[in-house]
Image (cartoon, coloured by chain):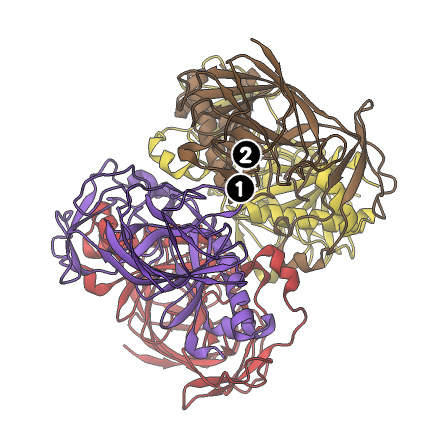
Chain colours: A yellow, B brown, C purple, D red
Amino acid sequence: MATHDFEPTHFHVTIGSHEPVLRVSSGDTVRTWCVDSGGFDRTETQITDGGNPQTGPFFVEDAAPGDTLAVHFERVQPNRARGVTGPVVAPHVVDPWFVAELPQEEDEDWWSIDLDAGTATLEKPPPGLESLGALPLDPMVGCFGVAPARGQAISCATSGPHGGNMDYRGFRAGATVYFPVFADGALFHIGDGHALQGDGEIVGTGIEVSMDVEFTLEVLKGKTISWPRAEDAEFVMAVGNARPLDQAVQHATTELMHLLAEDHGLDYRASSALLGQCIRYDVGNVYDPAYTAVAKIAKDVLP
Amino acid sequence: MATHDFEPTHFHVTIGSHEPVLRVSSGDTVRTWCVDSGGFDRTETQITDGGNPQTGPFFVEDAAPGDTLAVHFERVQPNRARGVTGPVVAPHVVDPWFVAELPQEEDEDWWSIDLDAGTATLEKPPPGLESLGALPLDPMVGCFGVAPARGQAISCATSGPHGGNMDYRGFRAGATVYFPVFADGALFHIGDGHALQGDGEIVGTGIEVSMDVEFTLEVLKGKTISWPRAEDAEFVMAVGNARPLDQAVQHATTELMHLLAEDHGLDYRASSALLGQCIRYDVGNVYDPAYTAVAKIAKDVLP
Amino acid sequence: MATHDFEPTHFHVTIGSHEPVLRVSSGDTVRTWCVDSGGFDRTETQITDGGNPQTGPFFVEDAAPGDTLAVHFERVQPNRARGVTGPVVAPHVVDPWFVAELPQEEDEDWWSIDLDAGTATLEKPPPGLESLGALPLDPMVGCFGVAPARGQAISCATSGPHGGNMDYRGFRAGATVYFPVFADGALFHIGDGHALQGDGEIVGTGIEVSMDVEFTLEVLKGKTISWPRAEDAEFVMAVGNARPLDQAVQHATTELMHLLAEDHGLDYRASSALLGQCIRYDVGNVYDPAYTAVAKIAKDVLP
Amino acid sequence: MATHDFEPTHFHVTIGSHEPVLRVSSGDTVRTWCVDSGGFDRTETQITDGGNPQTGPFFVEDAAPGDTLAVHFERVQPNRARGVTGPVVAPHVVDPWFVAELPQEEDEDWWSIDLDAGTATLEKPPPGLESLGALPLDPMVGCFGVAPARGQAISCATSGPHGGNMDYRGFRAGATVYFPVFADGALFHIGDGHALQGDGEIVGTGIEVSMDVEFTLEVLKGKTISWPRAEDAEFVMAVGNARPLDQAVQHATTELMHLLAEDHGLDYRASSALLGQCIRYDVGNVYDPAYTAVAKIAKDVLP
């Protein structure tokens, strides 16, 4: 149960079976940092190409295809005093006829981040938002996951069963996220910090920041899952990544029913009766090539 | 600002330009009741055909096409001690390959409702749910709205710009819902009470109950909206009804941007900056022919 | 087997259980005419409001819910020398980011129709199309169908199991289209002639014209179908109307498998083996609120 | 303009920046062969893992990112006397409620291929299809394309801007297909022969066969496209790969409008007027993770 301090020197814009940067044992903790989605580090210096560059991959001893990798986030902390956001909602999140009314060619917004107070403030608020003031941070990890099946290397713009660019607000410190293992060592990647993000990531960004992260990697031998799962203090969750959002909902609902069967002994008749009145859906992103839906249920109603 | 006690004697399974059952003035309050989605009343007697039968329509004096009708829910209260739910998740909310694994031909679940305690309990829990216990009620209105445009009469199975079968948990006592007016008098309909419902209405029902309702109808002259809007103590909201869910999200996001422009003076550049980091999406239903997405933002960040 | 000449005097912009304009027997033929989608007749005079106004409804004796109505088109003939088309592709048929590059506020295109030659020619071709010349006509019916279930009145902008605004090129003279009967007398409506139309109706119109039509209505007693079906000299077909197009494809494929079971004795294993290598899909419209997909198979491979 | 005879010895189940197996010049022709989708060669021997294994990649000298690679198919010829097809339609191409009615756990169908006659015949027709007889072959290439952007390696189960598993009947001998070049040398891959296939590939296969192929690779320097394009004797085409099918239609329509602008001088106003009445849509596949839509227009109406 060692703790590793890792200094990244290069980054990947795909999640794949890249050469591991560190080998750790199941149960070990890693402390490291990530550049922001554009490749900028804590000094606001671009040290690598943009596209959600990933720190890693981390090889976890004993992880083999068919296992599950648990990633517990101890710390997800922006490590600089500025972040950037997209200026206009994406054309695909509004009605098609409305797209021509959106402003074009706008500059990005910059936010001042007060790490002590835990807030972010627009540096130059667009007219109408002068009174907005400081918003509380809610730091999260936008893009992370494990090497996908069959030697694929998948762009960090998108997501799938291996995780990837899910952009879900619930992946914050305190959460544990579970991934199906497709490659020996699982090969965990992490990047794309957001100091704050609305549902859907509808301007194409959260408040993009570099960040310090600390996480514990644990192999669940012989536990096989099909899509990412997660849990926090209140909920157990299952994640679906696909377009349309309907299909993401289908993946997430199906995976949650499998979770309830495996972990709580509920057959599909019982999980139907429970989920029908108690399920909650969260929208991760509706911006990326694959959208992200999260199906979840409060732990306190589970057997 | 009169209060009307209305006893329904017949019901409609479409929302349309039907003969009004009562004429009220803007600002008046109506106290009435609704059968459940199957046409059963407070005595568990079927008094009309099923299909979300509607009480009404109520003609609101002075409401004309181009206006908005505000419906404030003072009371949404189940009025009997039993409700019924679908036994198995709908095939279209799970992965297509998984459908063949779902149980077939199951009986419905019945729930005992304790109106004093405000809870519901499965009468015969399926194996695995014996320990579930009582769930807190969260009563809501599943299907309600105004006569749609051009003389249409739209099935209470589905929804649209006129409202209809949106099955959104947020339409509960305390909420105000706004509808575009398409016909003289607006012609407000209401029915389909749920004592409790999960997101998505994925078993095709909430806990279906008859209910007593009290609501105030107000005409906003000259205020024109395109989709239902709503507000509660914490949020302002816009609703989109369509398939796929992606299109419902587009409708809701566009309407929320219009709301922020009209009511809070934010142009689309400003609303983008705000919504990007602060928007929340709720999933109403992913069961009905049209799915329902709700885009909302906390009032406390609005100018 | 009478032939009725019918002169319409009023029109409907919904398809519903309206008062019949004529009662005919099964097997009778009707000769009548339709205004164009904007309500303009053969003299280019607007005689009714636009929105695909329908001639009818025609009550067919003995047609009852659960039966099928067969509509055989003997004649679908534009009856004037000019037609109009939308000037720019709809924003929802192109990539969302591309919408802002489309021209705005353009005038409609007018086409000269040579009824003898059977061609249409742009009156003022936009720059680049000066050399286009005359295109062969392929007249079709855009919007037609029967009264939908449960007293609904559905806008002629959209479509469903009852037919409606399907905008499919294959509904031309020589085709027979089958509808499920939902109301006594079936209540057949017809309108929205197109002298020519590309797949998808992507500019929101075909070449919109008034037209003379002749069709024979036949009741198939006790034959129950779920979606429109059709046949022409070469193919049998099933139609799905929904969004997304994926769902329209699901409806059409399912209905075609039912057709092959009922009419050709193929169970789902056999129809799978056949359709897998022989099915054809046509795109009706991808413009209207519900999209239209057609699944078809050549008659010469059927048992 | 050399002709290369190439004997493959290993195969890839992703399309990516793999080590080239042969370097050719622009304008050169390659004669080679492909195993079937399951990795079986002309002797029905499995020589590699299944999953649409690809022959190649072929490095084309001078091809660089931003160029276009033209692939002209001189020959697409099954090279053995048997092929295999899936036995039941995929659950996602039928209505969700219908899935439970589909047969489960069926064996595949085998077809005898008569290469001289150019026909395929079911070896053991399921009951009901005994009279089916021989179907004419229409050989095509299911999965082929170029290395995608940014070092990605994308599963041969799916498709994207780089091509991949498009399963479109129109990619047959005589067609020329154009791909955007993302990597030096373009890195062309080819596999997944179908002796015959219906639209949509709805049983998950065509008649899967190994095949002999002959194709000419040409670099169009400085020509930049966004999605695959194609042409045959009658049509020019643009391809979109995505889910839902609506999005594939959007990609294909947009790319076709770009094609008409670049190659035929039509601005978007002119191409709208033309495509509105003349566009044709074909459905490639509605089975794979990304669906394929083809937008096309007859050459004889182009300026």
Q: Which subunit holds the residue at mark 1?
A: B
Q: Residues within 10 Å of mark 2 (few under 14, many from 20)?
A: many
Residues A271 and C229: in front is: C229
Position above or below: D188 against A126: below
Q: Give x and y (percent) for residue B270.
A: 42, 22
Q: Is residue B135 left or right of residue C245?
A: right
Whether residue A12 sits left or right of residue D237 in the image: it is: right
x then y, percent, for residue D8: 48, 78
Mark 2 highlights which residue?
B164
Q: Verify CB contact (< 8 Å) between mark 2 and mark 1.
A: yes
- Kindly give the residue lying farthest to the right in the view shown: B131
Count of residue discs? 2
**Residue A251's spot in the image, x, y percent?**
63, 50
In the displayed structure, A300 sits above or below B175; it is: below
Q: Is residue C55 above or below residue A198?
A: below
Q: Nearer the viewer, residue D12 or B233?
A: B233
Same subunit, labels 2 and 1: the answer reads yes
Residue bearing the label numbered 1: B290
Circle 1 crowding by C-alpha within 10 Å: few under 14, some 14–19, many from 20: many
- Give, as a three-letter code, the residue at label 2: Gly
The type of residue carrying mark 1 is: Ala
Closer-to-camera residue (C148/A285): C148
On the rendered image, what quadrant is the N terminus of chain B found in? top right
Mark 2 element type: strand
* Element class at badge 1: loop
Q: Do we see residue D168 in this rendering?
A: yes
Of labels 2 and 1, earlier in sequence is: 2
Pinpoint residue A149: horizontal percent, then vertical percent: 61, 59
* Residue D79 in sight here: no
Residue A56 vs residue C82: left or right? right
Distance CA(mark 2)–CA(mark 1) = 10 Å
